[in-house]
């Protein structure tokens, strides 16, 4: 590609139509559709060029996201999206990296990778699609399934209390922790916009509808059960739901308050915590830049290879 062509590509205005790839194949009413549209809106609002953006996923309904975004994409292994994304971030720090993962993919088989991804604080946006069920495998109990819900694997009702994704992320020292819902269009886009503009591992929990296999997971038609975190440095309350839901003033720089508010998850939405911390990829690049230069011929020992 010539320099002129590259410049034209960089300057091309990105539209929603430009970001469409193949037609989505999710169940009717699935919240993944609105997450897909929301991520596209984020890219248009920030004019993120498709050739500078990578969408990475694991396995599950959320795993199909890279197929429907006209960007670079990696549909990786179950629970292993973070190792793949780490390679992208380290090799191409100039790219915009979004990771898409479900509640099972994130907190069950992928829990160990999520732990280290948060701890390393590499620069990316991690979107956790939480429908409180294994949907792709037809209604199995997941780490966030509410206690007592009958499923194919536990017909008598889920026996364990669900894992709280927010306290999980906060406890591991995440530098950005937020929660939103895919049916709250403005709140969702504003939340992932804040996540994208934060340098570090931006953990975004998304309440997601699953009308086919877990229709009772979220009462998305009412907001009386919702609590919205408000602050001048946080995320705006969804306009159409503001009058119904409870609003609580919360400073995203206050970790103790973030833990206190997180006790009421999954009923709380907004920016829980934000902190500027060194990133793993930044540390690695700094070490490489400051490493002493060596003669390549003297790196290997004297043995013949």
Image: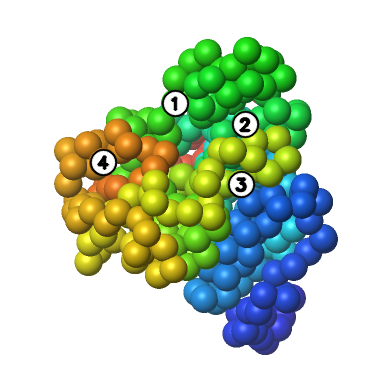
The image position of residue 44, as x and y in percent, is 57, 75
The image position of residue 58, as x and y in percent, is 66, 37
| Mark pair 2, 1: CA separation | 12 Å
Q: Is residue 19 visible?
A: yes
Q: What residue did someone put label 1 on?
A: 163
Q: Earlier in the sequence, mark 3 or mark 1?
A: 1
The image position of residue 227, as x and y in percent, is 33, 50
Q: Callout 2: few (<14), some (14-19), or many (20+) C-alpha neighbours within 10 Å?
A: many
Q: Is residue 8 left or right of residue 240?
A: right
* Nearest to the observer: residue 281 or residue 221: 221
The image position of residue 2, as x and y in percent, is 71, 80
| Mark pair 3, 1: CA separation | 18 Å
- In the image, residue 183 sits, relative to residue 186, either above or below, namely above
Task: Name the element at disc 4.
Answer: helix
Q: Earlier in the sequence, mark 2 or mark 3?
A: 2
Labelled disc at residue 209: 3
Q: Are marks 2 and 4 in contact (CB under 8 Å)?
A: no
- The residue mark sitting in front, 3 or 1, is 3
Q: What residue did someone put label 4 on?
A: 261
- In the image, residue 233 sits, relative to residue 158, either above or below, namely below
* Nearest to the observer: residue 95 or residue 197: 197
| Mark pair 3, 4: CA separation | 23 Å
């Amino acid at each position: 590609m010539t320099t002129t062509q590259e410049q034209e590509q960089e300057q091309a205005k990105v539209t929603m139509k430009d970001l469409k790839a193949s037609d989505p194949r999710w169940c009717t009413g699935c919240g993944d559709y609105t997450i897909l549209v929301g991520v596209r809106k984020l890219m248009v609002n920030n004019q993120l060029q498709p050739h500078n953006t990578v969408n990475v996923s694991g396995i599950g309904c959320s795993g199909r996201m890279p197929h429907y975004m006209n960007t670079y994409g990696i549909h990786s292994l179950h629970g292993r999206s973070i190792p793949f994304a780490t390679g992208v971030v380290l090799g191409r720090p100039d790219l915009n990296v979004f990771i898409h993962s479900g509640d099972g993919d994130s907190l069950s088989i992928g829990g160990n990778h999520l732990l280290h991804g948060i701890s390393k604080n590499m620069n990316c946006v991690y979107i956790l699609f939480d429908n409180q069920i294994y949907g792709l495998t037809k209604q199995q109990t997941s780490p966030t399934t509410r206690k007592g819900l009958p499923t194919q694997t536990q017909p008598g009702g889920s026996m364990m209390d669900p894992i709280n994704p927010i306290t999980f992320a906060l406890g591991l020292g995440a530098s950005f922790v937020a929660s939103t819902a895919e049916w709250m269009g403005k709140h969702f886009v504003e939340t992932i916009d804040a996540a994208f503009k934060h340098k570090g591992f931006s953990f975004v929990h998304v309440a997601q509808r699953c009308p086919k296999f877990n229709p009772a997971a979220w009462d998305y038609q009412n907001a009386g059960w919702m609590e919205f975190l408000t602050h001048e440095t946080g995320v705006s309350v969804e306009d159409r739901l503001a009058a119904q839901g409870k609003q609580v003033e919360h400073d995203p720089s206050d970790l103790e308050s973030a833990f206190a508010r997180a006790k009421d998850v999954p009923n709380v939405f907004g920016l829980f915590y934000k902190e500027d911390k060194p990133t793993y990829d930044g540390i690695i690049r700094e070490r490489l830049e400051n490493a002493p230069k060596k003669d390549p011929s003297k790196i290997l020992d004297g043995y013949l290879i």
